[in-house]
Amino acid sequence: LPFAIAGKVPRVKDLIVYPHSLYRMSDIELHLETTVEKILPKKKKVLTSKGEFGYDSLIIASGSVPIIPSIPGVEKDRVYTLKGIEDGEKIISSLEDAKDVVVIGAGLIGLEMACAFRKRSFRPKVIEGENRILPSLLDEDMSKELKNHLVQGGIIFHLGSPAKEILGNKNVEGVLAGDEEIRADMVLLACGVKPDVHLAEEAGIELGNLGGIKVNERMQTSLDEIYAAGDCVESLHGLTAESISSMSMLGSTAVREGRVAGINAVGGSATLSPILNTTITELAGIEIGAVGLNSEVGLQSGFEVCSIRFEGSSLDPFFPGSEKIVIKMIGDRRSGKLIGAQIMGKERVWGRILAISFVMQKGITVEELAALETAYVPSISPTFDPITLAAEMLLRRMSQ
Ligand SMILES: Cc1cc2nc3c(=O)[nH]c(=O)nc-3n(C[C@H](O)[C@H](O)[C@H](O)COP(=O)(O)OP(=O)(O)OC[C@H]3O[C@@H](n4cnc5c(N)ncnc54)[C@H](O)[C@@H]3O)c2cc1C
């Protein structure tokens, strides 16, 4: 959606990947515009707006809903959230006569949208209650570096003061953040999403501590023959010492979980390994990848955090087109293992964050990562890959 709003994907409708014919060809009966109103586990039935359906196995994939902050003014015209295609269409048509666009929230969606608005020649203003952008993903230094890049690109930030009110009568005129009134005639609320669990809760399915549906590694809920997957579930985190769950809220996690739930629901056997929340995005020409925990969350989770910041180049420095690549690596002194990494650069971030994600899934130590066999050709990758150099630096720091 942010790419469609930026104009990179020509039409919002192009975002629909699978046509209805594909479902028919796969023998899947698709019932659109049909709302499930109740699950009756004892009768193995669901009641919907278009009648009853019986089931042998059920998978709940009810997703998530945007979090609306409880501040005055959120109900005004031209205050939007972004979740589905209709939201995208409304935002695009509202931009036609908008002048001052404000985004509340500097998470992934808030920033992707701010960049989309910038691409359409607005000077978007982003309000964030925390004192840094992407606070749950990046360490402070990485966040600062990214912010400087986005400011240079024309995005205006108001950090450290949460939005208190959306001002105006029927229409939006501004946003109050701290004591400052920020002019706005359109506002996007990008304050995160929460799992949509009301159907599950009403059916008596157990929820976890974070408010998502509790599932085991087979994506089974607390009730027989009912599975759940995607944004509505709590997934087991691969790094926390005890069995602590995490709300992943990533499409990449949702499809993996959906596959496991689907296999098990029809009598197969599949398990989901704990998640690391491997994330990638692109903001104003910079790729940002992250996996595992940032330093702050690492400390809160009881790790003996040790981190380094490494600046290398995406190719051999002599090679034309070589770009700076910054790597933050976070290790745990006690186990010698990597618990998180963040990478930022104009190119070649994706493959590196995937490689780190893989080694983390395998639980290898920082020492082993420093010795990783990598490939070399000047036009694609340097002799010593930045991820092994960063690991070497972290290893030295950990042994001090
Ligand atoms: C703007 C935006 C950009 C994103 N970009 C990325 C990205 O680049 N990479 C990434 O990994 N993730 C991304 N995500 C996150 C990703 O979209 C979600 O993690 C993913 O869609 C979750 O899938 P899901 O099937 O669990 O839930 P959803 O996609 O939310 O689908 C749930 C569906 O269930 C339907 N539903 C709910 N209740 C009922 C009911 N009672 N009866 C019938 N139907 C019902 C809903 O209408 C909805 O269609 C993005 C999210 C947004 C909003």
Image (spheres, helix red, strand yellow):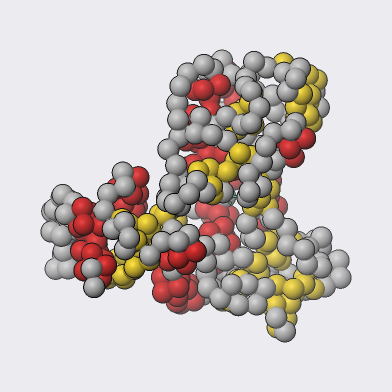
Task: Name the one closer to the observer, 367 or 304.
Answer: 304
**What residue is rendered at 69% in x and 24% in y?**
31
* Residue lying at the far right of the rendered structure: 169
How many marks can you see?
Answer: 0
**What residue is rendered at 78% in x and 29% in y?**
38
Q: Position of residue 164 (x, y in %)?
A: 74, 73
**What residue is rendered at 73% in x and 58% in y?**
68
Rendered view: 170 above or below 17: below
Task: Name the one closer to the observer, 169 or 136.
Answer: 136
Q: Position of residue 5 (x, y in %)?
A: 58, 55
Rendered view: 174 above or below 187: below
Q: Where is residue 180 in the image (x, y as percent from the top left)?
A: 70, 83
Q: Where is residue 273 in the image (x, y as percent from the top left)?
A: 42, 38
* Residue lying at the far bottom of the rendered structure: 179
Rendered view: 381 above or below 183: above
Quarter assignment of residue 99: bottom right
Judge left or right: residue 157 versus residue 197.
Answer: left
**What residue is rendered at 59% in x and 25% in y?**
20
Task: Name the one closer to the observer, 21 or 111.
Answer: 111
Quarter assignment of residue 123: bottom right
Can the viewer see residue 190? Answer: yes
Judge left or right: residue 55 versus residue 378.
Answer: right
Can the viewer see residue 277? Answer: no
Task: Name the one closer to the observer, 92 or 362.
Answer: 362
Q: In which quarter of the image is ligand 1?
A: top right
Quadrant assignment for the C terminus: bottom left
